[in-house]
Image: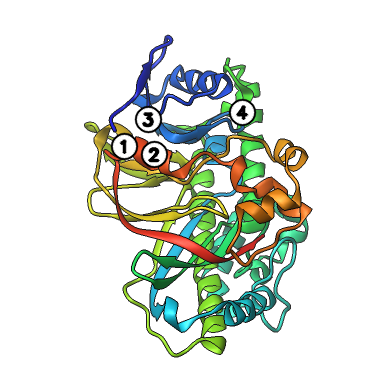
Amino acid sequence: MPIQQVIAEGGKPIKVWTQDLDEVSRAQLINISRLPFIHHHVAAMPDVHAGIGATIGSVIATRGAIIPAAVGVDIGCGMAAVRTSLTAEQIDERVLRRVYDQICRDVPAGREQHSDTRAPHDAAKPFAEPLQAMLAKHPKLLKSFGKHANWVNQLGTLGSGNHFIEVCLDESGKLWVMLHTGSRGIGNAMATYFIELAQREIDRQRAQLPDRDLAYFSEDKPYFKDYLEAVDWAQRYARANRNQIMRLVLSALKRHLPPFTLEGEVIDCHHNYVERERHLGAKVWVTRKGAIRAGKGELGIVPGSMGTQSYIVRGLGNPESFCSSAHGAGRCMSRNAAAKQFTPADLAAQTQGVICRKDKHVLDEIPAAYKEIDQVMTNQSDLVEVVYTLKQVVCIKG
């Protein structure tokens, strides 16, 4: 489905792939569109909803500047998925419950992390030297890390919120592993430090912004390069984190399921990140805040909620979206509102047939708190094509 509305309110045009746009999100998009360094237009995906400063589900192409809060505090957050040779006939609920328990034991979630003996020290080695160089230039970063300074032990951990690990079946009955997580506490600490630094710099320059959370670094200012180094570090760490979790989950499957092979490479895509790309005649910085890259032929992952289907997609390379697509269903209700409105019985009904937690502590992730994923996919039929449809049978929430 093509662009459903174009907003022009004194800045660059805003091209929106949905009619479902709340007033807060609309105002945030207008604020972004009025910044002087926006390139051509702002793209809003069909899962768009309000964020901090910038909307989640937006694609922001900029020339000569980057907005740290638009990249967000979970730098490099994204998805990974892989198809196995296992089929639905080779599994049953009893063995899947053992798989669920094994993954819970092997992959720390929430605020938990690996012990020193289980931490992936070899995988962490490439990150140590660049981090020390960063700290030499920004010693106050170490203070902001706090307990997250032990970042080696967090590599290969899920975190909390909407992060998850799922075992899914596709329409042909093949078993998949799919997961969602990012750069953990250390990425959050880096992001917070540089967001505050950008705000102080804007205050010092007495620059006028429609929202202080849109404070930015210009390419001609000293901290721009430092922020890029931090972003690059955190985005690589996030991908390494997903790699480690995938390794642990596949190992858990091998302990309880018949022998299997992987069918194809692991699909891995960021959906909170910034990258240098060429679009509409210029080389620009593209910030995808809750959006994935969907270049022509590129595979990506668009998850639903913990009770609905998800999609493996192939990008169509639409230039109007800066070769991007939605990153998921997108919330239609705040966490607090969901926790107040629904009960564990509601959660059990909406996750019927899925082995997962069904207690009050995960009510904020109930499927009804999210937009309809099928409507999101319909709205972006000119951005991606569906390759596989997945439905979870196991879901582990952070």
- Cα separation, mark 2 vs mark 3, equals 18 Å
Q: Are marks 1 and 4 in contact (CB under 8 Å)?
A: no
- Cα separation, mark 2 vs mark 1, equals 8 Å
- Please identify, in this view, whether the residue under mark 2 or under mark 3 is nearer the observer: 3
- Looking at the image, which residue is at 69% across and 46% down? 364
Mark 4 nearby-residue class (10 Å; few <14, some 14–19, many ≥20): some
> Can residue 140 be seen here?
no
- 78 w.r.t. 244: above or below: above
Q: Earlier in the sequence, mark 3 or mark 1?
A: 3
Mark 3 lies on residue: 17
Identity, as a three-letter code, of the amino acid under mark 3: Trp
Identity, as a three-letter code, of the amino acid under mark 4: Asp
- Cα separation, mark 4 vs mark 2, equals 18 Å
Identity, as a three-letter code, of the amino acid under mark 1: Phe
Mark 1 lies on residue: 322
Q: From the top left corner, tell me how far across and down residue 167 is, in percent.
A: 51, 69
- Please identify, in this view, whether the residue under mark 1 or under mark 4 is nearer the observer: 1
Mark 4 lies on residue: 213
Mark 2 lies on residue: 286
- Please identify, in this view, whether the residue under mark 3 or under mark 1 is nearer the observer: 3
Q: Nearer the viewer, residue 124 or 83?
A: 83
Q: Are marks 3 and 4 in contact (CB under 8 Å)?
A: no
- 302 w.r.t. 236: above or below: above
Q: Are marks 2 and 3 in contact (CB under 8 Å)?
A: no
- Cα separation, mark 3 vs mark 1, equals 13 Å
Identity, as a three-letter code, of the amino acid under mark 2: Val
Q: What is the quadrant of the C terminus in the image?
A: bottom right
